[in-house]
Image: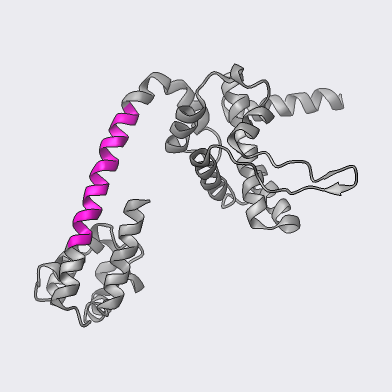
Amino acid sequence: ESRNRETNRIHKILQSGGIKLTTYIEDIMGLSGRNLLQLLVDRTLITPRIVHQSVYTSLKKKVPQLLEALDGYFSDHHRFMLKQSLEIYDFYQKQIELLEERINVYLSQYENHVEILDSIPGIDVITASVIISEVGVDMSQFPTAGHLASWAGLCPGNNESAGKKRSTKIRHGNSYLKKCLCQAAFAVKKQKGSPLADRFYQIQSRRGSQKATIALAHQLLKIAYILLKEQITYPEFLAQKKTTRDELVA
């Protein structure tokens, strides 16, 4: 989050100085973007040749547009602020890399569990590491998947009791775990045509995007519980469900 805040600050500095690179470069902190930002910091004379050498891939075809985008009113104060922000960004980036190395060492003993969780749509190695670090791998500590969801704060209360409607707000729980699972749900909803994505859009049509995201995050955590408990991958889980349905129909 700190790194993202610094990226946003860099965007504001550029806007303040009339630099419109973000119009043509989606990731200003990528290799091409950083090269162009460094030109500004170093007071380099901006020429078509210099810009062409500084960018990669399809951006080489946009040199005229990039030259125009770099033609702002960038003052010494803007340069100072940009230099400071880039150094802070690089510091955060280095800290993230060191932490990721440490996490990878820790996760090496849970390689099988990471692979199991990584098989779930929307859940990558980073999300898997969060689940393992926050929940553990021993699911016997939770009697059911519902208990785990409730502990995590992803289990809304019943909507109605004795004719009285209750709040459907999610309960307080593990905020870091909830955030990661909601990000995973956001990734899943882009996989249109998948059962989980279809489930998201069904709920969204009735209750809105926010509640659909929470519901899908809840579903992902319940699936993670089952897979870790049974020591199976997501494809194996789907195959088991299909076999059970076929047996019921037969």
Q: Nearer the viewer, residue 88 or 103?
A: 88
Left or right, 143 with reference to 178: right
Residue drawn at x 66%, y 30% as measured from the top left: 238
Give the image quarter of residue 37. bottom left
For the residue pair 140 and 235, the one nearer the viewer reads as 140
The main secondary structure of the magenta stretch is helix
Task: Give the number of callouts.
Answer: 0
Q: Does residue 194 appear in the picture of this structure?
A: no
Position of residue 223 in the picture relative to residue 123 (left or right): right
Can residue 89 be seen at all in this image of the molecule?
yes
Residue 90 image position (x, y, % from top left): 22, 51
Front residue of 57/129: it is 129
Residue lying at the far right of the rendered structure: 163
Q: In the displayed structure, would residue 97 be above or below residue 186?
A: above
> Whole-percent x and y of residue 237?
64, 27
Q: Which residue is drawn at 79% across and 46% down?
A: 159
Figure quadrant of residue 26: bottom left
Membership of 101 in magenta stretch: yes
Q: In which quarter of the image is residue 245?
A: top right
**Residue at x 28% of width, y 57% of height:** 30
Image location of residue 69, percent across then percent down: 27, 78
In percent of the image, x 63 and y 40: which residue is there? 154
Is residue 172 positioned above or below 139 on the image?
below
Give the x, y percent position of residue 32: 24, 62
Residue 1 is inside the magenta segment: no
Q: Give the range drawn in magenta.
A: 84-104
Q: In which quarter of the image is the C terminus?
A: top right
